[in-house]
Structure formats: structure tokens, C-alpha cells
Image (cartoon, rainbow, N blue to C red):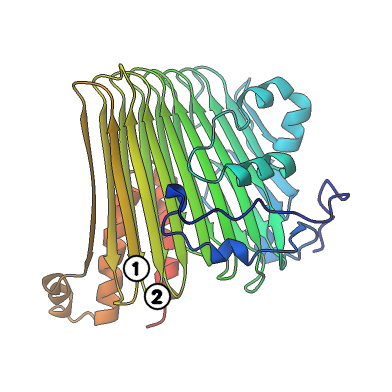
Amino acid sequence: MSLAAPPNPEVTSITLPPVPNRKEESWRFADLSQLKSLEDLQPASAVELDSAGLSTIGVEEASARFVFANSKLISQTGDALPDGVIVLSLADAREKHKALVDEHFMAQPFELGSAGYAELHREHTSEGVVIYVPSGVVIEKPIEVTHWLGGDKTVIFPHTLVVAEANAQVSVIDQFVSADETSASLSIGVCDLIAKDGANITYANIQRWNSATRGIQIASTSAGKDANVKSFTLNLGGTWIRNEATSHLNGAGGNSDMLSVNVASGSQQFDQRTLQLHHAPNTTSDLLYKNALYDTSKTVFAGLIVVDDGAHGTDAYQTCRNLFLSDDAEANSMPGLEINADQVKCSHGSTSGQIEDDELFYFLARGIKPTTARQLITIGFTAEVVDKIGNAALQDFALARIEEKFANLPV
């Protein structure tokens, strides 16, 4: 199936911002050669998807499904949604609900190093989904969005905007998939999650591109009074992925859970930067990132908790754990705290290690092969994070994708 050209055919090339300097703290330990090698980028054009690709879904049941391929919406289905709920493509939302998009679209500053790429996204984005849930409305089944990407030196700019009004509830899954196994493509995506007072948003980003694709994904969340936002990232594919996530705790009682699992193999590199900003008193945040590293893979984690003046009673945690499955893998972790208020509980930490001999012996003594034993232990290592999502449909889908990755790793 051949898809039509993207919405802006007059744009014939994409020029990236200047490559950052590795001396900048926000790019410390980053492999900037991955960005330096990007040139002659073209906006997304046609891509071929077979019938199996078009039928690929994530969760078994969804309130709505969107399928994009190289900046074009090719499929949209869904159940009848409650009155007032808006679930539209970004293009339609800009036309029909301009004030809503203008108010919330990329409204937060970009402070973790990729501001130039965010502005490029702002200029070129034409694909994505806008979700608006009115006060008190609960959407039981997840809303699922799939982005297909294909073509050498092709770049896309996917965007997800979710606004939940007071006491509303919604869950969303973004799935990122390659249309073929070889194209060296690029994605520069942004996600805005806004939970008003008492609202609940659960969001999952499932990335399983081919081994040649690069990606920059920038996420911003905002939690109002007594609101709760859970954001989960799963990195399985790609050759170099940069994730930046900022969480704003704006109202007393607001909570943010920042979760991530990264299974890195071959020469994959996953670079993640986070910022937990406590602006109001009695807010909570909990970050748990886990990396499983094989072969010569590399991960970078840099996270900072900031407690503003007057944000007394803050309760914030930050944990990064690295599990080495190879002596040649590399993990860099840089957690940090900046506290400007009293009566707070804040902690951060990072651990790195290999599978313990007694853990392995437990499986071997029961006749399980060493390779299978290591995979089971590693799946258990990641499952702690997945369990914290608190949404059965999203958890089952994430675990299935993790198991697929392990099944395809070399023995």
C-alpha cells in the first residue's frame, strides 16, 4: 500500500539545529557523533505497509485507535465516547479546536538540552493526536496511537497532547514502529500531558524501531491539585535514542510517577534526562528507571529533583538501576537534588551490577539453561517498573514487547 505525500510538500529538506557541545552539562556523556552524522534529511514521504502492518495493534481493546505512517493519518477507529470528549488528529484539532491547541501545545519551556530540536518540531509537526477529557469523565479503555516510520534519511515529528480536566481519567499508549528493518530514519517527537485538579493520566511510550533509527522524544507533564500523572517509557529498538522528561507539580497533593525500562543490546545507546519540579507544597514524585545492558550497549541517565521556595512537605524519590549482562556495556548515572524548602523528604540513588551467582544457581538447580535463566531474571528485574503503571492493559502489552525483545536476542 503506497501512502500519499505529507501535508507540506513545499518543504523539501530539513535542517537540524547546530550540534550541541559535549561540555554542556545537559549533553554530558552523550554520543554527539549520532547527531553529527545526520544530514540531507528529507520530510516524510511515501512508505509501504503490508496488510499485517496495517492491522498491527497494541492493546486488545481500545476506546480509539489512530495509525500514522510517515506523517499521514491512514486509519482512525473508535467507540462512541462520552459527550465533550475530543479525540482528533492534530490537524483536525487545529482546525476545529484552535483555542484548546493554542493554549496547551508545547506551552512549557524546554530545559534539558533539546530546545532547538523542540522548536524544529514546533515548526514542522503535522501528525499526532489531541485528546481532551471534560471534568469528571472517565475513559475506561486506553486510547492507542501507532506511528510507523520508514525511509532512509526521513524525519517525522509526532505529537501527543492530552488534557484531562478536573477529576477526569484517561490512559494513552503511543507505539513507535519501523516500516522496514533497514531504513535509517529520524523521529523528533513531543508529548504534552496536562492533568487538572484531581485528574488522572496514565501514558505509555512503547518504542520498538529498527536498529538503524534515531529518535529524540521530549515529554512535559503538569499535575494540578491532587492530580496524578503516570508516564512510562519503554525503549527496545533504535540505534540512538534521546528521551527528555520534565514533570511539573503545580498543585498541592499533585503526584507524578516517572517510569522507564530500557533493554539495550548490540551497540544501542539510550540517553535519558529528567527533571522533577516541585512548585507547590505537599507534592510527591517517584522516578524509577531500569536499564538492562547487553553487548557493547550504553545508557546515560541524568536526573534532577528541584524543590522550589515554599514547596514544603515535598516527598520526592529518584532511582536508576543498571543490570549488566555484558562486561563491555556502559552505564552513566547522574542523579541530583536541589532543595529550597523545609520539611521535605527527598532522596536519589543509582546502582549498577550483574546477576548474582546465587540468583543464577536457583534456576540452574531446577534444570533451567543459563541463557533462559538470565532472561527470566532480567524480565523480573524490569517487571517491577511495569507493575507500577497500574493499568492492566498497558502492563500486559509492555511485558509482551519486553519478552519479544529477549526472544530475539542472540543466545
In the picture, measured across the screen, residue 10 lies left or right of residue 374, that is right
In what quadrant of the picture does the C terminus appear?
bottom left
Q: Is residue 388 visible?
A: yes
Q: Position of residue 139 (x, y in %)?
A: 51, 30
Q: Position of residue 176 (x, y in %)?
A: 58, 55
Viewer-proximal residue among 26 and 239: 26
Q: Position of residue 17 (x, y in %)?
A: 66, 50
Q: What residue is rendered at 27% in x and 61% in y? A: 380
Q: Which residue is mark 2?
A: 296
Viewer-proximal residue among 346 and 16: 16
Q: What residue is rendered at 52% in x and 50% in y? A: 60
Disc number for residue 330: 1
| Label 2: which secondary element | loop
Q: Say what amino acid the circle numbered 1 marks.
A: Glu
Q: Say what amino acid the circle numbered 2 marks.
A: Thr
Label 2 Cα neighbours within 10 Å, binned few <14 / some 14-19 / many ≥20: some
Q: What residue is rendered at 39% in x and 61% in y? A: 299
In the picture, measured across the screen, residue 14 lies left or right of residue 212, that is right
Q: Is residue 397 visible?
A: no
In what quadrant of the picture does the N terminus appear?
bottom right
Which of disc 1 and disc 2 is earlier in sequence? 2
Residue contact between numbered discs 2 and 1, judged by CB atoms under 8 Å: yes
**Does residue 108 lie above or below 172 as drawn?**
above
